[in-house]
Amino acid sequence: MRNYLLRRVLQMVVLLVFVTGLIYFVLNLFPGGPFDFLAFSSDPRDADPMAIQRLEALLGIDKPWYERYFTWFLGVLHGDFGTSWVMAVGIPVGDLLGQRIGNTLTLSITATVISLTIGLAIGIWSAVKQYSLSDNIATAFSFAGQSMPTFWLGLMLIIVFAVRLKWLPAGDIYTPGKADDVGDRVIHLILPVAVLSLIQIALWSRFVRSSMLEVLRQDFLRTARAKGVAERLVLGKHALRNALIPVITIVGLDIPNIFSGAVVTESIFNWPGMGKLYLDSVLRHDIPVSMGVLAVIAFLVIASNLLADVLYAVVDPRIRYD
């Protein structure tokens, strides 16, 4: 296992260099620059091309993209993600990420735990009660959940629960003046978590159902029942453990999607997390901030793949890595 993990970590580093380099190249293909707004200034000195060129030289924007990328990557290796160009001029990107990542992790982890818990329960129940009324209801819910766009679902929840019923706040992370009120923060968390969770529950429940149905047809379960093993143990210990193997792959690859999917959710609910930070940075052409957020997401995707491989060996004792 140790040699396997070492090889995978080395592969992660190489892949992270390639992915971040590709992202940096694509971001630099976007038209415009961070100082385009100066062209609309009422002061003609702000729109002076020579002044803009001096600003670009100060930030190193006048250099080829690959030179800037390697400078950026070497800085990341030392914990320096650069400084913001536009959103918070001169503020280190690491500080901006540190201010937002806690809010995004709270949102994403809560949504992931709820999605896994409910998705597993619905998937197992649907498989055991195949073609029953509850299975048909779960199937309809799954299709509906996978078909709903995130932004539409978020707006509908706001209209119903915040505007019409006035049960929940429409956005923000807490009510002004109640930053230390845990209950107030939980209330503000309900709607964005619901948006992220409902779609994932619909998706994961279908994968669990499909995987469980395949396992339930296996001969070793019939043998366990013939030996008098309780149905609870047959389902929980034997069937579920084997059914989780393909599910781990889907969940491991999909967890970063919850993180990146928060871009839309955080924007709709004005949630001050990394998703909203990324969207604002792209709109303002603040490449260092955009790269910082995307680098974190890329790392999560690669690390999730490694975590899924390790969990295979935990769930299935037949799997060993040499």
Image (tube, helix red, strand yellow):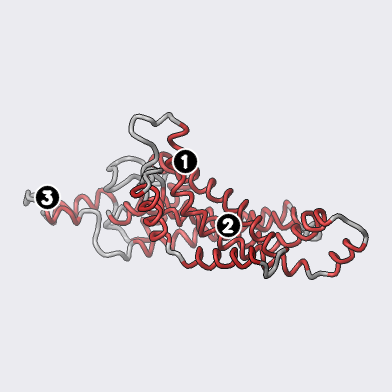
Q: Is residue 70 above or below residue 126?
A: above
In which quadrant of the rendered image does the C terminus lie?
A: bottom right
Q: Residue placed at 19% from the left, 54% from the top?
A: 53
| Upstream in sequence: badge 3 or badge 2 | 2
Amino acid type at mark 2: Met
Q: Looking at the picture, how far across and down is residue 113, in whole percent? A: 58, 48
Amino acid type at mark 1: Gly
Q: Which residue is mark 2?
A: 12
Instruction: Name the residue nearer the viewer: 56 or 35.
Output: 35
Direction from residue 191 to residue 268 in the image, left or right? left
Residue 102, numbered circle:
1
Q: CA distance from mark 1 to mark 3?
A: 37 Å
Amino acid type at mark 3: Asp
Q: Which residue is mark 3?
A: 46
Q: CA distance from mark 3 to mark 2?
A: 44 Å
Instruction: Name the residue nearer the viewer: 303 or 206.
Output: 206
**Any part of residue 30 in sight:** yes
Q: CA distance from mark 2 to mark 1?
A: 24 Å
| Upstream in sequence: badge 2 or badge 1 | 2
Q: Residue placed at 47% from the left, 67% from the top?
A: 147
Q: Is residue 271 above or below residue 301?
A: above
| Upstream in sequence: badge 1 or badge 3 | 3
Q: Residue placed at 77% from the left, 54% from the top?
A: 236
CB contact under 8 Å: marks 1 and 3: no
Crowding around mark 1 (Cα neighbors within 10 Å: few <14, some 14 to 19, many 20+) is: some
Q: Which image quadrant is residue 216 in?
A: bottom right
Crowding around mark 3 (Cα neighbors within 10 Å: few <14, some 14 to 19, many 20+) is: some
Q: Is residue 189 above or below residue 200?
A: above
